[in-house]
Amino acid sequence: MSCLAFGPVNSRRLGLSLGVNNIPYKHCTYSCIYCQLGRTRKLTIKRRRFYEPDEIVRSVINILSQRVKADYITFVPDGEPTLDSNLGLEIKMLKKKTNKPIAVLTNSSLLWMETVKSDLRKADLISIKIDAVSEEPWRKINRPHKSLKLDRIIDGIIDFSRDYKGALITETMMIRGLNDKPEDLELIANIIAEIKPKTAYISIPVRPPAESWAKPPSEEHVLTAYKVFNEKAKTRVELLTSMEPPPSTTEDPIEYILATTSVHPLKLEYAIKLLREKYSNTHQMLRQLENEGLIKIIEHEGQAFVMRRF
């Protein structure tokens, strides 16, 4: 199976989500300290072609042809999806070929570009990342490309929200000591109120982050964030503070594990459960994948995760 499409996975926001990986590993506009894929290898804001649109569509149709269910086809790649200059064309082709709603999860850093806005307007749901709206926490958390300007990004987000016809949601990743103070949360919530999303999600790191010192805030701080957003954001607020349910698959579990972990770490217990559906020697198979240099198993916050090696 091509890693250009993976899943479906149980998404905490989108139900059953069939992922599209339209960006090579860690080409991104940010190098977020909490990124579950590690530090960015290619920090860039230049949009260009990466894969052929036909190849992406074939990968998606190949999975759907196995009679799997999917609520959304979601662009959630190894980097920032809007760096792909073919994004608009790919969305258009997938909607025509699959008749499925299309979602894009973006860090919103390129929404000041008219070409990016035009591409994203073709999707049915857009998730916009807003971790900070003041300079210091933005630079510490997101570690942006040197040419990016925060005020320009925020203006682009607001402008896009005014004429976007699909479902718009926001996600804010809380990091202990960096953006969890009430004054930071109020500033973020005020911008969200201007955007008027369908739902504002508050997240914490639940998978191994790029930097081990990027810790989730205390429960008290999460509760404060929920209260502040409820008062200021003027929309529905939900918490994303736990792992999604375990996946299931009809395809070869090894291919599924490799494809899924190329985009985000997978709890070790989930990987074992998947392998047991087809194989008896699950731990031996995991050791073999480790020995072949395809995966690694790491500990985070007292839990074991399978991660893809690149």
Image (cartoon, rainbow, N blue to C red):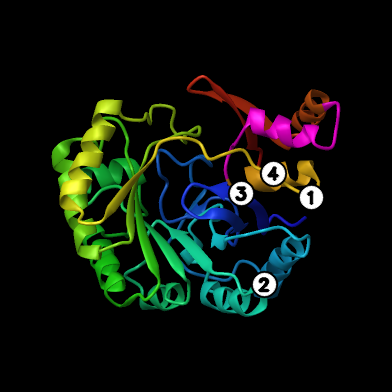
- Give the CA distance from mark 2 to mark 1: 24 Å
- Give the CA distance from mark 3 to mark 2: 24 Å
Q: Which mark is residue 9?
A: 3
Query: For the residue marked with disc 2, what is the amino acid?
Result: Glu
Q: Quadrant of residue 296?
A: top right
175 and 213: which is toward the camera: 175
- C-beta proximity under 8 Å, tags 2 and 1: no
Examine the rendering and report whether any part of residue 218 can be seen.
no
Q: Which mark is residue 52?
A: 2
* Residue 276 percent across, percent down from the top left: 79, 32
In this rendering, would 43 be left or right of 169? right
The C terminus sits in image quarter: top right
Query: For the residue marked with disc 4, what is the amino acid?
Result: Ser
The magenta stretch is: 264-281
Callout 2: few (<14), some (14-19), or many (20+) C-alpha neighbours within 10 Å?
Answer: few
Give the residue pinned by disc 4: 248
Give the residue pinned by disc 1: 251
Q: Element at badge 3? A: strand
Callout 3: few (<14), some (14-19), or many (20+) C-alpha neighbours within 10 Å?
Answer: many
